[in-house]
Image: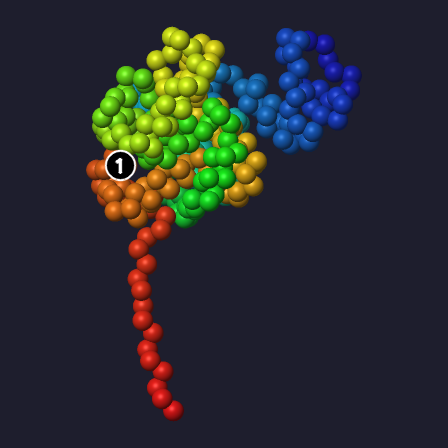
Amino acid sequence: MRPRKTHRNLPPCVYSKHGAYWYVKEGKWTRLAPDLPTALQRYAALAAPTNSGMPALIEIAHVEIIRNKRPNTVSQYDQCRRVLKEMLAEFAPEQVRGADVATVKSAYADRPSMGNRLLSYLRLVFNYALERGMVDYNPCVGIKRHAESKRRRYLTDAEFHSIYTAASENLKPIIMVAYLTGQRIGDVLKIKLSDVSADGIYFEQEKTGSRVLVAMTPDLERAIKAARSLHRSVASMSLFSVKRGGRPYTYATVQDMWATAVERSGIPDAHLHDLRAKSLTDAKRQGLDPVALAGHADPRMTARYIRQHDTVVAVPPKLAEF
């Protein structure tokens, strides 16, 4: 490699051009960042040997961490793996201290759920290393999780109708089946045609393994009929499928469709997961069994989804006569 004539303060393969720093390897230019500190941090992640340091430990541990995990969990852990490899690129496993883990936590103070997921995943990585004698202790021990506030959002009937009306024709049946069955969106998207019968829709929940048969009702029958009427591949075995290839919809695709419908409707702070909360809340209000609908073994789990708990009616004292 020829010696630099300019920018000798930069590490190998890093160049400054067009107001940013770039990592150049085998003719490929990868943009790092416009400022040097951030650029150096990202450079460390790209240039670090794949068989050393925290990136290597994370990759090795990841194989064991995701073993026998459900697809949704694997997807979440994959995201954690990518984030932590970049954040801890300059560290060797034995160099990571509790203060460094706390820094990872504080970086996600505005996203506590993601921050807690990173902490949980990193704890698993160091448990793997500790069991194999690669480190002497787990630096995640003693680091408290972010306090996550319970979501209290309830979609009113009017808000639900507005979002449904603004939704695309492909999304409308998904919204309706998700609400009427009260199931997680991932389980809804996995419905096979063979799961639908005159008795209802059969679910084997991915997260809990619970088996639930949601009984057929006129409303549910109409929603299923609407889903079947959409253009679909003849070979598709799924109730909801992409026209080309007959593949089931992915969560990311449906999330994008939902975001578009919410934006068109003008309804603020409406999440796709609010459909399940609305379904279970409405079931309770109508005198039905939300625990059975949710597929929970413990009623306390269902209670987390109920948005409008029973309100105690208090009678005020009488005012004394003067």
**Residue identifier under label 1:** 293
**x then y, percent, for residue 194:** 28, 17
Determine which quarter of the picture holds residue 218.
top left
Q: Which residue sits at x=59%, y=25%? A: 42
Instruction: Specify whether 181 is left or right of 213.
Output: right
- Percent across and percent down for residue 167 are 50, 31
- Relative horizontal placement of residue 25, taking residue 75 as reference (left or right): right
Q: What colour scheme has been applied to the protein in the rendered image?
A: rainbow
Is 131 or 63 nearer to us in this picture?
A: 63
Report whether 195 appears left or right of 307. Answer: left
**Residue lying at 57% horizontally and 18% vertically, measured from the top left:** 47
What element does badge 1 sit on? helix
Q: Nearer the viewer, residue 300 or 25?
A: 300
Q: Looking at this view, is 182 or 198 the one in front?
A: 198
Q: Residue at x 71, y 20 (%)?
A: 15
Q: Could you tell me which quadrant the N terminus lies in?
A: top right
Q: Position of residue 192 (x, y in %)?
A: 32, 18
Give the quadrant of the C terminus: bottom left
Instruction: Locate residue 278: give its quadrant.
Output: top left
Q: Nearer the viewer, residue 298 or 200?
A: 200
Q: Residue furthest right?
A: 5
- Amino acid on which the number 1 mark rests in the picture: Leu
The residue positioned 39% from the left and 45% from the top of the image is: 144
**Is residue 231 something that shows in the picture?**
yes
Please identify the quarter of the rendering in which residue 207 is found: top left
Measured as percent of width and height from the top left, residue 266 is found at 56, 41
| Rendered position, 299 above or below 192 | below
